[in-house]
Amino acid sequence: MIWNEEFETLPREALEALQLKRLKSLVERVYDAVPYYRKKMEGAGVAPSDIRELRDLRKLPFTTKEDLRLNYPFGLFAVPFEQVVRIHASSGTTGKPTVVGYTKKDIDSWAELMARTLSCGGAHRGDVVHNAYGYGLFTGGLGAHYGAERLGAAVIPISGGNSKRQIMIMQDFGSTVLMCTPSYALNLADVMKDMNVDPKTLKLRVGLFGAEPWSEKIREEIEKRLNINAIDIFGLSEVMGPGVASECIEEKHGLHVFEDFFIPEIINPETGEPLPPGERGELVFTTLTKEAFPVIRYRTKDLSRLIEEPCRCGRTFYRMERITGRTDDMLIIRGVNVFPSQIEHVLMSIEGVEPHYQIIVNREGALDIMEVQVEVSEEIFSDEVKVLERLARRIEREIKDLLGISCKIKLVEPKTIQRSEGKAKRVIDNRKL
Ligand code: DLL
């Protein structure tokens, strides 16, 4: 069901008129209220009056994580602090977290966006939403929570962790919608198996998964093992939290960007130039309605492309392709560019390999050594050494064929790789330590 028929099916022309109106007011607001943004605009020789059509967005300078860091913690807030009613933060890999704020109206918009997301994935009033995204500074838990309430569903604020208890609650409370990271969904599937709980006996029908990269293969795995429909949802703290884009259950192909709230752009990450429609590059977002923490042309470092073709579901918003990587997740191993998603692709195409793996990079002398630790199924692990060796050689060969470099493969027993309750950590690069 479409949650907000009026906005989600706006003809493009009307949508673009609305975007332009909101963009003009955003730029004026930010120019007046945030000295840092004003200075950047002046430096780029652009004033609010230069924004006359949507294309003029390109005249505005980008905002980056570095800008956020320089203004830590509240320097980019665009309203008097008394109007801020919520603060979230996302932990970066290094240093201080990224801090974001919300006014009452922002929280209200966010609830609307998450109600749309849930509805897009096929959830409705009467559903029991099992919300296993982490509650706290992370935007996942509370973001999903307010959306589920807005939808009129019954939300279980279970947060992450204590998986056995999660499964007991699913059984007893009749959870119908699961919300968590895809890696935690797989973890729950493992624990269910250990507890001898057949997912077919549960009422779970759909899962809304995001906050970390995953692939079609992982989707298939989750759908099969939990006996549900798995939907990809996307967002980031700097732009809102979850609720920026969502797949529809009708197509499960591309995530509708809620374009009355956000303008997406795809740029060449090296030159910053906008790319022609349909090309893959770095996603950039401008928030159109946010009051406390608006961002202009925020560079996400996430790689995707926009799909402009109309969708069967009736929503007129463009779709973004599922995230295929980040500009900063590329590893350089002995001079060769390696994306973790390429390794995952190889692993997931091989029978008997479990969707739990970790890539460990070390430097021995001047040489980079990449080791891929991967879990294999119980049956294979208890097989003869010869079988295991053959499997390891095969993975090694396939990675070499794809990437042109050799790596060490270490097959490990089921449940050896550390499970996450939130975002999985797939890469450990010891070279940087
Ligand atoms: O992860 C918000 C969120 C919560 C989204 C719950 C979906 C569900 P951050 O912690 O700021 O916010 O991390 C944002 O996570 O730039 C992407 O790199 C990645 N990410 C989020 N959703 C997806 C997805 C939340 N569906 C960063 N696929 C983003 C791939 C995703 N990566």
Image: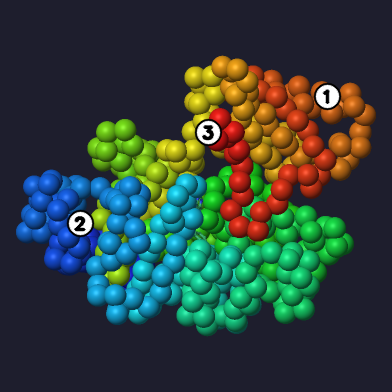
Picture quadrant of residue 385: top right
Disc count in the image?
A: 3
Q: Nearer the viewer, mark 1 or mark 2?
A: 2
Mark 2 or mark 3: which comes first in sequence?
2
Image spot of residue 278 (x, y percent)? 35, 41
Residue at the image point whose x is 45% and y is 50% from the top: 95
Report whether residue 4 is seen.
Answer: no
For badge 3, the amino acid type reads Lys
State the residue at coordinates (49%, 19%). Answer: 335
Q: Element at badge 1?
A: helix
Distance (Cα) linking label 1 and label 3: 31 Å
Task: Return the residue at label 1.
Answer: 389
Left or right: 246, with 415 as reference point: left
Which numbered disc, 1 or 3, marks the residue that appears first in the sequence?
1
Residue at image location 80% in from the left, 69% down from the top: 201
Assess whether mark 3 and mark 1 are in contact (beta carbons under 8 angstroms).
Answer: no
The verdict on label 2 being within 8 Å of ligand 1 is: no
Residue closest to the eye, 114 or 269: 269
- Mark 2 and mark 1 in contact (Cβ < 8 Å)? no
| Drawn side of residue 194 relative to residue 41, left or right | right
Q: Position of residue 225 (x, y in %)?
A: 74, 55
Secondary structure at numbered mark 3: helix
Name the residue tied to disc 3. 432
The residue that mark 2 highlights is: 36
Q: How would you rate the neighbour count of disc 3 (Cα within 10 Å): few for under 14, some for 14-19, many for 20 or more?
A: few
